[in-house]
Amino acid sequence: MQASEKAVAATPSDTRPAPDARFPLSNRQIWNMCAGLFGVQIVWGLHNVNTSRIFQALGVEIADLPILWIAAPIAGLLVQPIVGYLSDRTRSPLGRRRPYLIAGGLLSALALCIMPNAGTLWACSATLWLLTAAINIAMEPFRALVADRLPDDQRTKGFAVQVFFIGAGAVFASILPWLMAHGLGVNLAADGQALPPSVRAAFYVGAGCLLLAVLWTVVTTAEPEGPPDMAAGRAPERAAADGGGLGLLRSGALWALGGAGLTGFALGTGQEREIHLIAIIAIAFGLAQVAAAILRGRGAASLGMLEIVEDILHMPHLLKRLAIVQFFTWFGLFAMWIYTVPAVAARHFGSTDATSTAYNQGADWVGVLFAGYNGVAALAALVLPALAARVGRRACHAVCLLLGALGLAGFALVDDPVWLWLPSVAIGCAWAAILSIPYALLAGAVPARKAGVYMGIHNIFLVLPQLVAATILGPLVGNLFGGHAIHALTLAAVSLAIAALCMVFVPRE
C-alpha cells in the first residue's frame, strides 16, 4: 500500500463529505419541500409565547419557570439525534424523512389540543413533554431534507426559504390568541379557568394548520426510498481513529467521573435541581462511550445507536467551533423566550399578577412583538442569500447576531411599549440568520450519508445552553436580579454579543 493510501485509511471518512452529486431543484420544489415548517413553527410559536403564561396561570412562581421549560431542550437533546440516526437508515416507500414528518405532525397536533385544557401543573408539564418530543420528531427531518436534496450552491437559499416559512408560521401563531380575542370576539377573560377561551381556541387552530402544512410537504416532495450505503468501511476506520477503542474508554471514564463529581458537588452544596440533570447527562454520555469502546474491542462492526457517540467525537472541525457560537446564541434566546412576557408585563404594563387584565394585555402585546420579529425574519431570509454571497456567511451571521444583541438590550432601554417594535425588528434580523446560516455551513461540512444524524448532533449544541440557562437563570432572576425579569433580557443581549465575537473563530467556507 502506498503512503498516501495509508493516510487515507487512517483518517475517518465520516468527517469528509462525499462529492456533491445532487441536482438543483426549481424554486417551486424548494418551497414545497420547506412549506411544512410553517406548521412546525406554529407549534413553537404557541409554545414560546404561551408556556410561561400557562404555568403562571396555574400558580407557578417566576423563579420556577426555567425548570418547567426544560422539557424543550431535553426533548431536543434526546429526540433529534435519534431521529436523525434512524432516518438516515430508514427504507420505505415514502423515503427516509417523510415517515417521521407524518408521525411527528400527528403527535404534535394531539398535544396541542390537550395542553390548553390541562387543569393541573402535573398534567400541563406532562403534555409539554409530549408536545416538545413530538415536534422534534417532525422538525429534524426538514433540516436533513435540504441537506439531502440540494447542492451546496442552493443550500443557503434552501435554509433561507425554511426561515421564511418559520417566520410566517411564528407570526401566525404569535398573534393567534390576539386575533381570537380581538378579531373573532372570543372571550379574553379566563372566567375562573386557567386560560381564557381565546388562547385555547388558538391551540386548536394551530393543530389543524400544523397537519395541513406537514401533509403538503409530504405529498409534494419526493425522495429516494432508501439511504446510501451506511456501512462501507466504517468499522476499521473508526477503530483506527479511536486507537482500538482506548480513546473512547478514556473519554467515557472522564465524562462519567466528571458527572459524578458534579452530582456530589450539587448534593453537598444544595444546588438547584437542574444541576443534577446536567450531571446525569454527563454520566450517561460517559457510559455510552464506555459501552461503545467495549463493543468495538469485541470486534463489533455495528454499534446501533451508540454510533451517535462516535459521530459526536468525530464531528467536523467546523461543527466544533460552531458549537461555541450556538451555546451563547441559544442561551440568550432561551432567556428571551422565558422572560419576555413577565418582563414586559411588569415593566411596561405594571403587573406581575398572571390573572390580571393588565398582565394578559402585556402577554398579548408580547405575542404581537414576537409575531413582528418572526415576520421580519421571514422577509430578511429572502435577502440573506445575496448578502451572504457578497460578504461571506461568517460575517453575515456575526452582524445579524450583533443586531439581535442590540434588540434584546432595547427592551430594558425603551419605556413606551408601543416602541418595542424597534427592538423586535433587530431581533428578527438575527433570527433569520440563526435559523439558516449555521445549517448552510454545516450541510457542506458533513458526509451526505450522515446528514440526518449530524443535523441532530448539531441540535445538541442548541439545547445544552438551554439546559445551562434553565439551571442558572432561576437563581439569577430570583436572587441577584431581585425578581426583575427585565434584567434577564439584558443578560441575553450580552450572550448574543459574545456569540457574534465567536464567529471570528469559525473556519471559512
Image (cartoon, grey):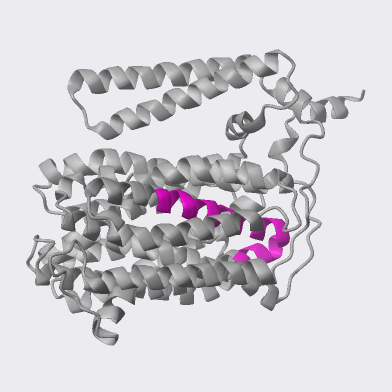
Q: Is residue 47 visible?
A: yes
Range of magenta residues? 130-158
Residue at x-position 43% and y-position 26%: 282
Q: Is residue 396 left or right of residue 178?
A: right
In the image, residue 206 sits, relative to residue 9, either above or below, namely: below
Q: In which quarter of the image is residue 426?
A: bottom left
Tally of numbered discs = 0
Residue 10 part of the magenta segment:
no
Q: Where is residue 471 in the image (x, y as percent from the top left)?
A: 27, 38
Residue at x-position 50% and y-position 70%: 38
Residue at x-position 53% and y-position 61%: 436
| Camera-nearest residue between 166 and 219 | 219
Residue 145 part of the magenta segment:
yes
In the image, residue 41 sits, relative to residue 287, either above or below, namely: below
Q: In which quarter of the image is residue 318?
A: top right
Q: Is residue 438 visible?
A: no
| Camera-nearest residue between 450 and 54 | 54
Q: Where is residue 364 in the image (x, y as percent from the top left)?
A: 23, 72
Q: Position of residue 354 (x, y in %)?
A: 13, 61
Image quarter in which the N terminus is found: top right
Outermost residue on the right side: it is 1
Q: Is residue 450 left or right of residue 471?
A: right
Residue at x-position 69% and y-position 46%: 88
Q: Where is residue 313 in the image (x, y as percent from the top left)?
A: 59, 30
